[in-house]
Image: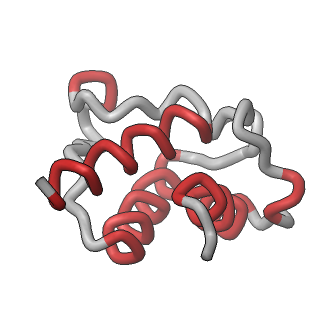
């Protein structure tokens, strides 16, 4: 079974047009060339894949509490949302 981070890496790689092997936990969306539309599409894909609701507003991304700093922080935030849903 794939880990949350592996699935997040695969989703982000797809949005960036990259091989998942080229996406590391330390990769930033900016370094991968993911633009704002790609971020929104990745968020939708993450929500669908994990059956969660991501608190993200494209107009104010820094104020959402969903850390988009790196692939690792996104995966950690997704895991947190999964854990909240299960609680």
| Residue 34, placed above or below residue 14 | above
Q: Position of residue 35 (x, y in %)?
A: 58, 47
User: Which residue does the image show at 73% across and 31% down from the upper left?
Assistant: 26
> For residue 2, which quarter of the picture?
bottom right
Closer to the camera in the image, 73 or 30: 73
The coloring applied to the image is secondary structure
> For residue 6, which quarter of the picture?
bottom right
Q: Position of residue 63 (x, y in %)?
A: 22, 23
User: Which residue does the image show at 43% across and 71% down from the upper left?
Assistant: 45
Q: Position of residue 24 (x, y in %)?
A: 78, 43
Q: Position of residue 37 (x, y in %)?
A: 48, 56
Closer to the camera in the image, 31 or 84: 84
The total number of labels drawn is 0
| Residue 65, placed above or below residue 34 | above
Closer to the camera in the image, 52 or 18: 52
32 displayed left or right of 45: right
28 displayed left or right of 23: left
Q: Residue furthest left?
A: 87
36 displayed left or right of 70: left
User: Which residue does the image show at 45% across and 39% down from the upper left?
Assistant: 76
- In the rendered image, the quadrant that contains the N terminus is bottom right
């Amino acid at each position: 079974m794939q880990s949350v981070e592996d699935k997040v890496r695969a989703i982000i790689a797809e949005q960036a047009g990259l091989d998942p092997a080229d996406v590391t936990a330390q990769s930033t969306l900016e370094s991968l060339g993911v633009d704002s539309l790609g971020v929104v599409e990745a968020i939708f894909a993450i929500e669908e894949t994990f059956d969660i609701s991501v608190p993200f507003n494209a107009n104010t991304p820094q104020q959402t509490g969903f850390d988009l700093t790196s692939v690792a922080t996104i995966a950690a935030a997704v895991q947190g949302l999964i854990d909240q849903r299960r609680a």
